Image (cartoon, grey):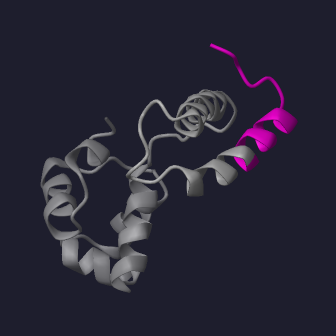
Amino acid sequence: MAQIKSEAAYRAALRRIDELLPLTGDDVQEDDPNMLELDMLSDMVEEYEDVHYPIGKPELPDIIKLRMYERNLTQNSVAQLLGISPSRMSELMHGKMEPSYRLSRALCKKLDISPAVVLGL
């Protein structure tokens, strides 16, 4: 399969995808030339982005910050919710400590954080 080899080609592919999207609705056949081109360009863009714009795994402190933002919580209120001291919460938020089993369970249950994220998987 062809590859996107430059940033300019990547941007051109994104523009072409934007042009093709309105032409490929739910009622379009899979063998439609626009659908085939869109599918091919999408695969090429995905491959380019995987190399040049990789998305890393989320870190636990980042997920906790997201939950705090979503629920309008402060670091102190999260510490209280989890049953730990504010200083332990600070250590957790700065990556200076790993959560214990009890704290890991509390993060999963009380902040609805995936066990995979808590365990770093």
* Residue 75 makes an appearance in the image: no
Is 18 contained in the magenta span? Answer: no
Q: Residue at x 54, y 31 (%)?
A: 36
Instruction: Looking at this view, name the residue that lies furthest to the right.
Output: 8
Residue ranking furthest to the top: 1
Q: Residue at x 63, y 28 (%)?
A: 44
Q: On the picture, is 81 further left or further right than 88?
A: left
Residue 99 sits above or below residue 62 on the image: above
| Dominant secondary structure (helix, strand or loop) of the stretch shown in magenta | helix
- For the C terminus, the quadrant is top left
Q: Where is 84 relative to 9, above or below? A: below
Nearest the viewer among 45 and 74 is: 45
Residue 82 occupies which quadrant of the picture? bottom left
Quadrant that contains the N terminus = top right
Observer-nearest residue: 11 or 87?
Answer: 11
Give the residues in magenta.
1-15
Question: Is residue 1 visible in this depiction of the protein?
Answer: yes
In this view, 55 is above or below 80: above
Residue 21 at what x, y percent from top left? 58, 52
Magenta region includes residue 13: yes
| Percent position of residue 48, x then y | 66, 29
Using residue 86 as the reference point, say whether residue 52 is left or right of it: right
* In the displayed structure image, the side of residue 74 where residue 37 appears, left or right: right
Q: Residue at x 66, y 39 (%)?
A: 53
Left or right of 1? Residue 85 is left
Locate residue 51, reporting x and y percent: 65, 27
